[in-house]
Amino acid sequence: MTTDNAHKKGFIPVMLTPFTDTGAVDHHALASLTDFYLRSGVAGLFANCLSSEMFELSDEERLQVIRQVVKVADGKVPVVATGTFGGPIEDQADFIKEVYDTGVQAVIGITGLIAGQDETDAVFNRRIDQLLELTDEVPLGFYECPVPYKRLLSAEQLHQFASTGRVIYHKDTCLDIDQVRAKVDATDSFQAFGLYDAYMVHAVESLKAGAKGLSCIQGNYFPELIVWLCDHYNDPALSVEVNKVQQFFIDHMDVMHHVYPTVSKYYLQKRGVNISTYTRRDVGSFTSEVRNSIDQLFEDHKILQQELEITSVS
């Protein structure tokens, strides 16, 4: 994924989809949310992903959401979006082209929807070859989405795909820093290609290993903090602060994943963002205990933000 500052590390948020309290896509709130990400300093936007509740959207809603994000971004940063939702490869290729026509930089394939859990890497690789053939020159990427199951790609596969010049983006969810290093090493010679890590427990290690950036749900709480980490992860003068930020993400990992994305929408409400907590996906009950844990996260982050002198947007 290329930006005007391609040499820099970048944060690509996995975008939420705001809904009205009756469950319709809230396009006004989506425009405001997109602007919120942009003002936070993100390097790009990942629309129509799992955090967006993409499986709960119709094809037309997916396209409407992506079009709006591209329109609001207005070329300030590149946008990527998911374009594969199962079925015959020919159908997936057709929808990839529809998504690309919205103006995104690359269309993302869900690895677990390109080949079944019982199918081999050879089958997966053949289907990617088919997709490349059927989608003209559309730039593609991969997302190791945990739904319907998490299909991880090997370093060898990524090397093979990136070498085509057509695959430029990879959202990694392997949770294994050694695998991340191997994937980065295998694709390092392809300047157009970028690996973005989703796992904040080893965020600093991943950036130092050569990942192009981060793409994580924590950006739906405090994107400015992740932008700060991408900017300063390797600054010797700020090593103490960097370690503190890394530990903050480790210490608060569980609370941010529980009842997500309801909790992140509530958190953004506390920050002054215009967004309902409504979700189409059943993610569990937003109990008073869960609310209290998010309220505490809010206070803990406020203290850290003041220590780092990071200016919040709202």
Image (spheres, grey):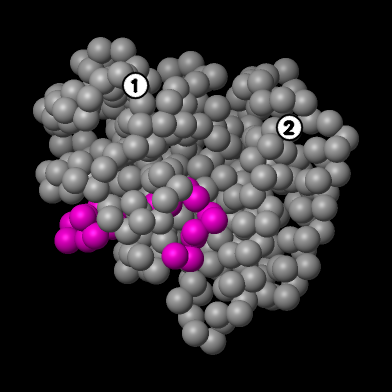
Element type at marker 1? loop
Q: Is residue 13 above or below residue 189?
A: above
- Region of the chain picked out in magenta, as a range: 184-205
Q: Outermost residue toward the bottom? A: 237
Q: Position of residue 132 (x, y in %)?
A: 16, 31
Given residues 140 and 35, the one toward you in this image is 140
What residue is rendered at 24% in x and 60% in y?
A: 185
Q: Are marks 1 and 2 in contact (CB under 8 Å)?
A: no
Q: Position of residue 63 (x, y in %)?
A: 43, 25
Given residues 206 and 18, the one toward you in this image is 206
> Quick check: 136 left or right of 216?
left
Does 144 appear in magenta? no
Q: Is residue 111 above or below residue 104?
A: above
Element type at marker 2? loop
Residue 277: image tag: 2
> Quick check: 213 left or right of 116?
right
Residue 50: image tag: none
Q: Mark 1 highlights which residue?
A: 117
> Quick check: 25 left or right of 114?
right
Answer with the quarter of the image where residue 311 lies. bottom right
> Quick check: 102 left or right of 27?
left
What residue is rendered at 64% in x and 71% in y?
A: 244
Q: Position of residue 75 (x, y in %)?
A: 39, 51
Mark 1 and mark 2: span between their CA atoms?
33 Å
Q: Position of residue 270 (x, y in %)?
A: 79, 48
What residue is rendered at 36% in x and 56% in y?
A: 178
Given residues 276 and 152, the one toward you in this image is 152
